[in-house]
Image (cartoon, rainbow, N blue to C red):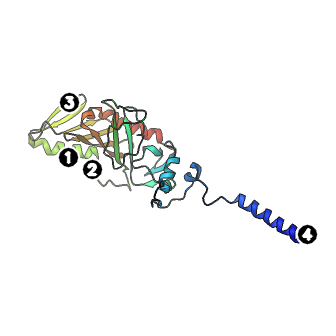
Amino acid sequence: MGHRTASKAAATGLLLLSSLVPSAHAAETAEDVYRLPCTEPDLSAEPGHLTKEAERTRLIDPAHLVAINLGPLKFRIPWAYFYPRPFSTHLNCNPNRKSVSIQFWIPDLKAPERDLWGKPEFHPSETDRPHPGPYESVIVVTGIQYYGPGYPLKESSAEQRIEKLLRLYRNDGLNLINQGGLMKMRTKYTTEEDGQYYFRSKTDSLFLWCLPKYCQAYLDLMDLNLTAQFTIRREVFRSYLQASQGIRTLLARWNAE
């Protein structure tokens, strides 16, 4: 009887222990993903199954906040706005960054439904936006960077670009044309298909280099010591204020201080 009792007690103890230890094959939850350490993701695919990363990505709430520091500025950015969106194992990495890239719609400033990394789509059809209007467009913002003492810029800011071109074009018959608050630099080299434009205020400098299909924009948020670059479709480049002010609005919304 003693042996049977001891065996039964041992078996009960093992069952209790097994119930306390998570199964290695238990399905991960969103909270499990949010607690993952910062490591490189396992991107190996299993035939007939989603990769582990794809399974984890489905669990991430688009509004899940990820901490990012640019110089002394601290932000908490919703996961869906990143370009590209961070891997599941990059949610808890060192928040200090040299730069960060984001994506959003104008005019409503919402995040795209899908990560558009590697997909040059600026007018995608979405569940809640099956037929985007002519003035709706995705803005891809690359290289938002803090500058100041100890944080040098790798490229010229918008303000520096504008000043440089104004000096350079003085001898090329420069003519400045105000087009709804946006100044067009017209020189003897300007064509109908391309153009260079700028906008200046006390806090913002914006420079646009436009080609037939797209404009490359350089933005300087001088009061925040932040620079950024973004791409905007030529058809909607007159909505430059929606794009540049949208960047400022989103950064203010995500300010963690």
At label 4, which amino acid type do we have? Met
Using a 10 Å C-alpha cutoff, classify the residue at mark 2 as few (fewer than 14 neighbours), some (14 to 19) or many (20 or more). few
User: Of the residues under marks 3 and 2, which one precedes in the sequence?
Assistant: 2
Tell me, yes or no, if residue 227 can be seen here: no
**Residue 199 image position (x, y, % from top left):** 26, 36
Going 29% across and 47% down the picture, which residue do you hit? 157
What's the distance in space between the residues labelled 4 and 3, CA to CA? 100 Å
The residue wearing badge 3 is 178
What's the distance in space between the residues labelled 3 and 1, CA to CA? 19 Å
The residue wearing badge 2 is 156
Indicate the secondary structure of the residue bearing disc 4: loop
> Quadrant location of residue 127?
top left
The one nearer the camera, 5 or 98, is: 5
**Residue 95 image position (x, y, % from top left):** 48, 54
On residue 1, the disc is 4
Going 38% across and 33% down the picture, which residue do you hit? 130
